[in-house]
Amino acid sequence: MSSRAGGQVSPFVFQPFSRRQKQAIFWWRPGSGHEHARMMLADGAIRSGKTVAMIFSFLQWSLTNFRNQDFIVAGVTSGAIKRNVLAPMFRMLETFRIPWEYRRSESKILIGDNTYHVFGADKDNAQDKLQGMTAAGAYADEVALFPRSFVDQMIGRCSVAGSRIFMNCNPNGAYHYIKTDFIDRAEEIGLYHLHFTMDDNLTLSPEIRESYARSFAGVFYRQYILGEWVSAEGAVYPMWDDRDNTYDAAAGEGPLREGEEPRERGLRRFCAVDYGTVNPCVFLDVWDDGRTFWIAKEYYWDSAARRRQKTDAEYAEDLTAFLEGDRDAMLIVDPSAASFKAELRNRGFRVQDAVNEVREGIATTAVLIGNRQIRAERSRCPCLLREMHGYLWDEKARLHGEEKPLKERDHAMDALRYLCHTRTSRFRRRV
Ligand SMILES: Nc1ncnc2c1ncn2[C@@H]1O[C@H](COP(=O)(O)OP(=O)(O)OP(=O)(O)O)[C@@H](O)[C@H]1O
Ligand SMILES: [Mg+2]
C-alpha cells in the first residue's frame, strides 16, 4: 500500500527558529565550525523544539547531498514514530512541495530520489532488522530509549562516504550509555552535542510551559523539564506523604457517605488487579471523584506465605466478594493475565487492559501522588502502605545505566501504576 495522502496532509507552518534550533539545522554546512563532526546529538527538555529542527535539518542535508541512497529513520515504537516523526516530516515535505510517497507496508518513504527506511527500536533484537543494510545516514528520535545494540548497529550501517547520524533524546539516568559513551566523549568520537531547554522553542506560551511542568514530579521533573541527566535513586515515590496521601473512613473522611448511593454522587468505581499465582495477587478497590482516586480497601493473596495457590475461579470468587457483587466497576487488569481476564469476562465483569509502560507509568503515578490525587484508606490498605515505603529504584541496574524499580514486593505498586497510567492521559489529564 502506498500513500501520499495528497491533499490530506496540511503543510507545516514554520515559525521563527531559535538560535539553538538554527545550530541544529546548520551544523553540517561547510563553515558552521562543526561540519567535521560525523554525529550530532540534541538532548534536553521535552517540547524544546529538538525534533522539528532536526527533521528539517536531516531532510535538507540528505536531499542536498545524496541521490539514490538509503537512510535510516528510527523511533521507539511505530506509534511514536508516526506521531512524532512522520507526521511533521510529511507536513514539512508538503510545505516545500517535495514529492514523497509513504509505502507503509514496506516501512519506507520515497523522498526525491532517496529511500528512507523506518524502524522501531523498542525490542532487544530490533537491530537484526538493520543487518546487511548500507545507509548514507540516520535520524534517531528519542534515542535514549533505544537498546544500545540498535544504536551501535545503526551507526555501523552508515558506511557510505559522507554519511552522518542525527540523534535526539530527553535525558535519562546519569549512567546511561548515551551520557557516558556519547555526550561525555563527544570530542573523541566526533559528536556535536547541543543542549536544548524550553527557552529554545519560541512557540511555547508560558501557560503551556506551566502545564508541562505540572506534568512531572521528582526525578522525571529534573530529566524532562530541567533537562538534567540524573539518576533515580532511593524511593520511587519520595513525594508520598503518610498523612496527605491517606484518609480515615472511620473519622468520616473519604468519598463514601453512609446511606448514599456513590454513583448518584458522580463517583466511579475501578478495581486495579495485579495478577499472580506463584507471586502475590492484589486487588485495589478505588472510587474516583474525577480529581482523586480514593483507594477504599485492598485484597492481597500471597500464595507462598499462605502455602496455597488459588485457581482463576477462586480468585474470581474472591474478587466478587471483594466488590460486594458489584458488576459495574471497571476492572483494570494486568494485560498478561489472559486466563484470568477471560474468567472475569465470563462472569459478567467489565475488564480493561492496563497500560503496562513501567517508566511512563511511574512518572504518571508520581504526579498524582504529589498532587494528593491518590489517597488510601489508612487501616484497610496495609500492604499498599508497606510496599510504598519499601519501593526503591534498583541500585545495581542504575550503575548499568538502566532505571527500573527493584522487583521486590511491588505487587500493590504495579496495581496502583496500572490504575493511574491507564486512567490518565499523557499530559496528566484524567480520562
Ligand atoms: N520553528 C518552529 N516552527 C513551528 N513550530 C515549532 C517550531 N519549533 C517548535 N515548534 C512546535 O513545538 C512543538 C515541540 O517541538 P518538538 O516536537 O520539536 O520538541 P522536542 O524537543 O522534540 O520535544 P520532545 O522531547 O517532547 O520530543 C512542536 O510540536 C511544534 O508544534
Ligand atoms: Mg521530540
Image: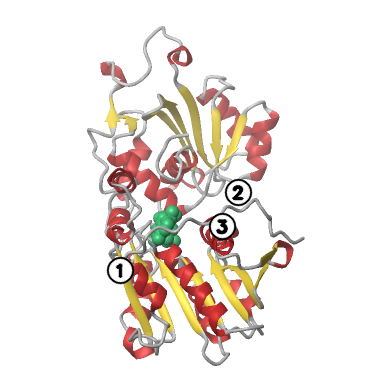
For label 2, the SS is loop
Residue at screen point 60% across, 64% down:
97
- The answer to whether residue 27 of the structure is visible from this angle is yes
Label 3 or label 1, whichever comes before in sequence order = 1
Query: What amino acid is at disc 2?
Result: Ser
Q: Which quarter of the frame holds ligand 2? A: bottom left
The answer to which quarter of the image holds residue 254 is top left
Residue that label 3 marks: 87
Query: What amino acid is at disc 1?
Result: Arg
Residue that label 2 marks: 336
Picture layout, residue 429 above or below residue 71: above
Residue at screen point 52% across, 59% down:
88
* Depth order, front residue of 221/141: 141
Residue that label 1 marks: 19
Mark 1 or 2, which is nearer the eye?
1
Q: In the rendered view, does 314 fall on the left or right side of 162?
A: right
For label 1, the SS is helix
Image position, residue 298 (x, y; %) = 43, 32
For label 3, the SS is helix
Residue at screen point 36% across, 68% down:
21
Circles 1 and 2: CB distance less than 8 Å? no
Query: What amino acid is at disc 3?
Result: Ala
CA–CA distance in space, label 3 to label 1: 24 Å
Circle 1 packing at 10 Å, graded few (<14), some (14-19), many (20+), is few
Whether ligand 1 has any atom under 8 Å from the Cβ at mark 2 is answered as no
The answer to which quarter of the image holds residue 194 is bottom left
- Among all residues in the image, which is located at the extreme front? 97
The answer to which quarter of the image holds residue 197 is bottom left
CA–CA distance in space, label 1 to label 2: 47 Å
